[in-house]
Each structure stands twice: as structure tokens, then as C-alpha cells.
Amino acid sequence: MLVLALAGGALTVGGQATADDTSSDATATAAAAAEPRDFGPAEADNENTARVLAQAENRRIEILAERTETSSAYANPDGSLTTEAFAAQIRVKQDGKWKDIDTTLSDTGADLTPETAVARIAVSDGGDTDLASVSDGGKTFGLGWQDTLPAPHVDGDTATPPRTHWVRARRSR
């Protein structure tokens, strides 16, 4: 018999063996308990649900209602709460949902843009003189180049121009 009791925000699990239990059932239960289980995302909509899940799953659970641009709050298996605060923004709200910042560049046609960023960022994908620009709150800052830019090599969040476009400073004697 398995008993689940919820009191004061804490979950208590208790059990009692019955005469019908066999040693093979007990061995199978012990083996199943030792295997890691996939409980799904470690998050809950509110603090009460997070506290129950944290204790039941023996892992910390993020409290989504407490999530901000610069912090995450967690319910811990021991019943305590933890907040992690970051010096800079780690996520943005898009279409009412939080998305982690992802600076991986993708070609959106006219330029290269990060998947998710705090501001609108555009990097040249070649064929024009606009090197890069950043726009936020109705203000834009951009850099240009005197010649038409070649297509850069893109690797994740980095766009590297061909070596012929690197400016090298020479030391004069």
C-alpha cells in the first residue's frame, strides 16, 4: 500500500509491505527505484506545485511564475527556495513566453540575425556595404564598409569575413 499525504506544502510518501509481496517484486522495485527516470522538464507554474514536485522527484524545480529577464527561482527537495540572479539579461519575453537568449546566427534573407536577442541585431550576409547594426527602443547604431562586403563564413554565433578583408596594421620604422 502506498500513501501520499500533503500537509503544509510538504509531500510525505509512506508505504507498507503486504503479505502478497514476493522477494522478486521487492528486487524489481529496488532496481526500478535505482534507475534514473525522466520526469520531464524541471519546472512548474507556481511555487506550491514546484515544492511538491521537488520533494516527490528529489530534484530542484524552477518556479515559472518567478522567472524574470535576469533571475530564476527554484524549489528544492529539502523544502527551501533558491533564487539565481544574473548580472545581465539571460532571456527575453517574446509572444508572452520567456525565451533564453540564443546568439546563433541565421540567414534571414537580407542579413544575418541571432535567434533570440535583447535588441534587433543585423550582420551583413554579403552583397552590400552595411556591416552591422543594433536597434532597440527606436534607436539604431550601425557600421558600414566602403566596399561591397563578401559573404562571411558563419559558425554558430560568429560571422567571419574572408581574410582579404582583414585590415592589418604595419609598424613603420
Image (cartoon, helix red, strand yellow):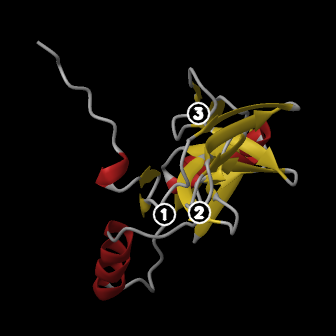
Mark sitting earlier along the chain (2/3): 3
Residue 172 percent coordinates (x, y): 16, 16
Relative to 125, is 78 above or below? above
Q: Which kind of residue does numbered mark 3 sit on?
A: Gly
Query: Given contact means CB atoms under 8 Å apart, are the residues at marks 1 and 2 in contact?
Result: yes
Q: Quadrant of residue 48?
A: top right
Q: Can residue 52 be seen here? A: no
For disc 3, the marked residue is 79
- Location of residue 133 in the rendering, given as x and y in whole percent from the top left corner: 67, 40
- The answer to whether 108 appears left or right of 131 in the picture is right
**Which residue type does callout 2 highlight?**
Gly
Q: Is residue 8 above or below residue 46?
A: above
Give the position of the C terminus as an image quadrant: top left
Q: Which mark is residue 127?
A: 2
Mark positioned earlier in the residue sequence (1 or 2): 2
Mark 2, mark 3: which one is toward the viewer? Answer: 2
Residue under label 1:
151
Residue 81 pos. (x, y %)? 61, 28
- Label 3, label 1: how many angstroms apart (C-alpha)? 54 Å
Residue 165 — which label?
none
Is residue 104 or residue 132 the one in the foreground? 132
Q: Quadrant of residue 63?
A: top right
Name the residue at 56% across, 42% down: 146
Residue located farthest toward the front when viewing the structure as drawn: 173
Q: Amino acid at mark 1?
A: Ala
